Amino acid sequence: MNPVHTESNSMHLRNKFSLMLFYRDDNRESQAMRIVINEAVQQFELQKIISIEEVEFDRENELCLRYKIYGFPTLLVFVNQELVEKYYGQIQKNDIEKILHELIHN
């Protein structure tokens, strides 16, 4: 039996979703965000749909300049390699879950 592909399912399969987290190793909020994002992606089994890139703030000056990152943690959300959202500061787990849900279902 073949799976049914609705318009939203096929759109979902065509889009490439990415999260880019700018963090610092010595920052508690950054460490908490790294854990929360990875847990949320695994909880909803989105590893095949959403890629996560963790960028160490102090080592990637070029990326920080390109995306105008001046503080940490900062989360960038991409759809098809286009920046669609930018979040500053620590984000709680339930908010990360909302972001992922909106990303996948919009």
Image: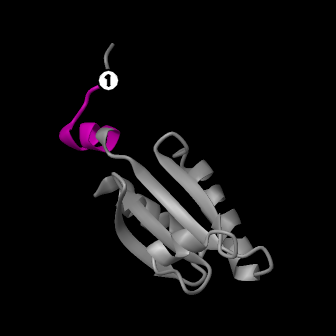
> Magenta span: helix, strand or loop, mainly?
helix
Q: Amino acid at mark 1?
A: Pro
Q: Which residues are magenta?
A: 4-13
In the picture shown, does residue 54 fall above or below 94? Answer: above
Residue 52 location (% of width, % of height): 56, 54
Residue at the far top: name it.
Answer: 1
Q: Tell me, yes or no, whether the highlighted magenta stretch contains residue 77.
A: no
- Which residue is drawn at the image coordinates 50% and 64% (left, top)? 97
Q: Is residue 54 left or right of residue 10?
A: right
Residue at the far left: name it.
Answer: 7
Residue 75 location (% of width, % of height): 52, 72
In the picture shown, does residue 37 fall above or below 11? Answer: below
The quarter of the displayed image where residue 53 is located? bottom right
Secondary element at tag 1: loop
Viewer-proximal residue, 71 or 93?
71
Residue 20 location (% of width, % of height): 53, 63
- Which residue is drawn at the image coordinates 24% and 44% (left, top)? 8
Q: Give the color scheme: rainbow, by chain, secondary structure or one colour.
A: one colour
Residue 72 location (% of width, % of height): 62, 82
Total labels drawn: 1
The reply to whether residue 67 is visible in this rendering is yes
Q: Which residue is mark 1?
A: 3
Q: Is residue 50 left or right of residue 5?
A: right
